[in-house]
Image (cartoon, grey):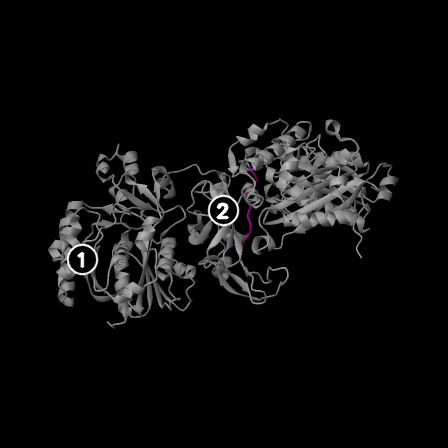
Amino acid sequence: MANDSGILSYGAYLPRRRLQRKSIAAANSWFAPGLRSLAKGERAMANWDEDTVTMAVEAARDCLAGLPPPEVEQLMLASTTHPYDDRQNSAIVAGALRLPSSLRVLDVTGSQRAGTSALISALAGGGKALVTAAEHRLAKAASPQEMHFGDGAAALLVGRGKPIARLIGSHSETVDFVHQFRSGERAHDYVWEERWIRDEGYMKLVPAALAELFRATGVAPAAVTHFCMPCTLSRVAPGVAKRAGIAEGAVRDTLAAVCGDTGAAHPLLLLAHALAQAKAGDLIAVAAFGQGCDALLFEVTDAIGALPPRGGVDGALARRKEETNYLRFLAFNDHIALERGMRAEADKGTPLTTLYRNRDMVTGLVGGRCRTCGTPQYPRGRYCVNPKCNALDSQDDQPFSETRAKVMSYTGDALTYSADPPAYYGMIEFDAGGRMMADFTDVDEGKVEVGMPMRMMFRVKEHDTVRGFVRYFWKAAPV
Amino acid sequence: MATGIRDKVAILGMGCSKFGERWDRNAEDLMVEAFEECMLDAGIERNQIEAAWFGTAIEEQHVGKSGVPLAMTLRLPYIPVTRVENYCATGTEAFRGAVYAVASGAVDIALALGVEKLKDTGYGGLPQRGRGGLNNMFWANISAPGSFAQLAAAYRVKHRVDPKDLKRAMAHISVKSHDNGALNPKAHLRNKITEDDVMNAPMIADPLGLYDCCGVSDGSACAIVTTPDIARGLGKKDLIGVKAIQLAVSNGQEAQFGEWDGSYFATTRVAAGRAYKEAGIDDPRKRISMFDVHDCFSVTELVTMEDLGISQEGKAIGDVLDGFYDASGKIPCQIDGGLKCFGHPIGASGLRMIYEMYLQLNGRAGERQRPDPVLGMTHNLGGFPSQNVSAITIVGRYGA
């Protein structure tokens, strides 16, 4: 691999709510007393308007923060919970990021290894690629998975440039070891016994993959400074490290206490976390388990110090709201039949012709800027909105998604149907000009005020449950 | 040079159904109820009506589209019937069509009728409505109270008003309207309320509580208009003339351009200025005898009284709390109880407002009668503060 190739940037995203595991246990331990032993810490919990696509967009935005627009040749979205089976999910992400149509996209799925497999493929391709991985896994009430899982996303920009980490090598082992599966229309995983997964799965397959990785690269395992391996079973990562010859001190925290396991995204999330804390010369090993193992070895470069500041995993963890209402979690994930009222019955159909014609406006939040008078406006009109101008077809594309805004007027509406009432929305004014009436998201009741700074976030606008369509748009969230 | 419509058209008759939860009546029944009263008042035969305008907004809800439901229900004799819709200003829009037809000389006698049957939805508040394919993709998840509630936030910040003072003034507005509505047999809500009731009511859209919101009702109202000469020829004395009808419709400046601050109605200011000019009124605070404004929400009324130029900008709270707009005040506002007590059957509301002005000017307002009114002004608003239709009508004694 060329010397100027590797990981160029990283980003992460976690939903703001953190469901307290003691709240899950309090609700369910009457049925499953064993949950009490898991009732520690918290897990990231997607808002009702978040899914794999929206979280991938936010992680990608974090990844691209402060960088000149990269000439991305490929975009991947790795997940086992893509909202669509037949509609390229990564194409939606590309639209939200306003990437040019000259782009290869790929949804990578089918395994907890999807994230690392996408990364290995992107690194091997050589071109500039944005690898995103996100997961919004459902789990049955009172299951250990409900405790272990977390929702979140990570993104890595790879290719030629000034890499912050170079790939020294990777190795994959593929074995149809079925520790869990989810098929067809099933919403939840079916999981085999933990002891077998630990002894025959992790403890055998991962060390074997790592051994081949170290043999092929000629790197001594003891030289590894960061070992990233997601695993929800206790004490397995140190056991694997020991068997592979990696120092115990190199084993990184799996974020189990503060985030939970984000599935296919988790190896990349742990890698992003390691990159944020690594210094030049550090060696990062990543292992992802699932029908075998992906193992990757990176060397951190001097360029790590020059990467523009970003939120990363720590930023995502710091943007936190404690959630103790387990019923809200069930409702957001459609696990209980709430009486949503007749207002929720309104038809939320999306005319696909209209969406296509206006895809940059809707998915990309692109408005116009008048060449004649300079007025930014959303949405774009054929005539400029400035009454002193009104020029025809005078507007260049003006993206608003990366522009900060301030609240001009607002309300918390208890009448309109919302999955999380009251629905907050209001007029926002963009700092660079232009305004729109926007839904707000991730706000706290009673904490909104005129003048409050906001940023735009890509979210689910409507779930069309009649047709199974998810409609996305941008909402304003507190900075 | 256009001369406007001042006194070119006289109201020959008006009618208004009982507003309320008319569970046992179809929209067609309400239309007949208003029409029968109107025809009796006008003293003409059905075949003297030469053109009609039919105002209804959410027609999917009850009668269906087009002018046909009006012609069918009233058995109108193969005359032109135009169905109009202009958000919640639909009633005034129907009136405008009939008045303009007479003013133009195209017809001698024209009918305007508005109706809405809202209480067939199964839930409270206005029915959910489609906004159009593209609008649904980017418009916020707004309800009517939620869009108007934002006026309060912007107004309070702009004028540095304590939220409690604003809420108290809003409460006074609702209490006053209930006092008036209690005296009106056609009103939906006829109970008196207290400021504490308003302040402590459940929140609908912050800061609007239940009693800051108007009712939701079924109802119909109608008018028959003609020229002053024909009205006299039909034996009418003390004519009620139409002094002005003005609409202003948002073009995106509020919602998309940088000047509007969210605390007022840009359209109402424009429409009011044009209406005063059309009616030849220089000092409305001295000349207008009474108002019926679009009090869909208490804060709308408060802000509107500034936009109409009656209270100074930022000073409406003082006028409201001083009782300036009470029934016993200098210029009563919502003397009939307003939308607050009538509810808001959309197509009917604009005509219902004019109906009260007409009763008052004719001395037929019963317990609510004001001494010797000369000019009455209605304000009928559709849409949201950021994009709306503002419709203003001034009626008064002929020649005044």
In the image, what residue occupies the spot 14% across and 53% down?
A248
The residue under label 2 is A425
* Amino acid type, callout 2: Tyr
Is B182 above or below relative to A8? above
Is A335 above or below relative to A1? above
The residue under label 1 is A175
Chain letter of the residue beneath label 2 in the structure image: A
Looking at the rendering, which quadrant does residue A20 occupy? top left
Residue bounds of the magenta highlight = B125-134
In the picture, the quarter occupied by the C terminus of chain B is top right
Question: Can residue B314 be spotted in the picture?
Answer: yes
Is B332 above or below relative to A271? above
* Viewer-closest of B117 and B331: B331
Question: Can residue B84 be spotted in the picture?
Answer: no
The answer to if A317 sits in the magenta stretch is no
Few, some or many residues within 10 Å of mark 2 (<14, 14–19, 20+):
many
Looking at the rendering, which quadrant does residue A302 occupy? bottom left
In the picture, the quarter occupied by the N terminus of chain B is bottom right
The answer to whether A371 appears left or right of B16 in the picture is left
Looking at the rendering, which quadrant does residue B17 occupy? top right
* Amino acid type, callout 1: Val
Mark-to-mark CA distance, 2 and 1: 50 Å
Is B251 above or below relative to A340? below
The percent position of residue A202, horizontal first and vertical second, equals 16, 52
The percent position of residue A121, horizontal first and vertical second, equals 27, 65
The answer to if B127 sits in the magenta stretch is yes
Helix, strand or loop under label 1: loop
